[in-house]
Amino acid sequence: FDYKKGIWFNHEYIMTKPDEKIADLFKPVLRAEGIDADKYSDAFLAKVVSLVKGRVNFVKELWNQACFFFVAPTEYSEKDVKKRWSEETPRIMTELIDVLRGIGDFSSKPSEDIVIGWITQHGYHMGNVMNAFRLAVVGECRGPHMFDITELLGKEETVARIRRAIDVLK
């Protein structure tokens, strides 16, 4: 039996199964991690699964890829902080909070257009701002599309996470 081929088959199985079915399989994993899965709608869980399932071979691996959807970061990747958080980042993140608060439709595409426009308008470095934004919200510089994450988390949670990062990472 080729173990690596079995892993590949499992990945393919996850990719072809509907997100709702994988979300049902993910619920026991959430519970094992201390998360009340019943607190989240099936639609929310299916969307989370859709964003991260391409990165896993087993359902239990979904937690490592999606934990930040359920638990706000309290610590931040040292490597990413050194690379992505500078002296001016708190000021820029505070400005970003104001931009985010002014967005009416907080879904992915409209939010992205507004934030990218703001970054461009102010002449900020796109990579520095977006990676600091990701670091603040996720806790490290990894994960699915940033604005898909913020759409699911919602405006208030996104802003709260940025504020927390500003306070912790001064």
Image (tube, rainbow, N blue to C red):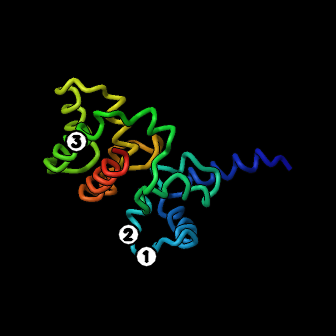
- Report whether 39 appears left or right of 49: left
Residue ranking furthest to the right: 1
Residue 8 percent across, percent down from the top left: 69, 46
* Residue positioned 19% across, 38% down in the render: 114
Q: Name the quadrant containing residue 117.
A: top left
Residue 71 percent across, percent down from the top left: 43, 62
Disc 3 residue type?
Answer: Leu
Instruction: Report, in whole angstroms, how far the alpha carbon at label 1 lies from the one at label 2.
Output: 7 Å
Q: Which residue is mark 3?
A: 96
Q: Which one is nearer the viewer's eye here, 75 or 140? A: 75
Q: Which residue is mark 1?
A: 38
Q: Is residue 11 above or below residue 79?
A: below
> Neighbour class for label 1 at 10 Å: few (<14), some, many (≥20)?
few
- Report whether 38 appears left or right of 106: right
* Residue positioned 47% across, 63% down in the render: 20
Instruction: Report, in whole angstroms, how far the alpha carbon at label 2 lies from the one at label 3.
Output: 29 Å
For mark 1, give the secondary structure: helix
> Neighbour class for label 3 at 10 Å: few (<14), some, many (≥20)?
some
> Neighbour class for label 2 at 10 Å: few (<14), some, many (≥20)?
few
Q: Which residue is mark 2?
A: 41
Instruction: Report, in whole angstroms, how far the alpha carbon at label 1 lies from the one at label 3.
Output: 32 Å
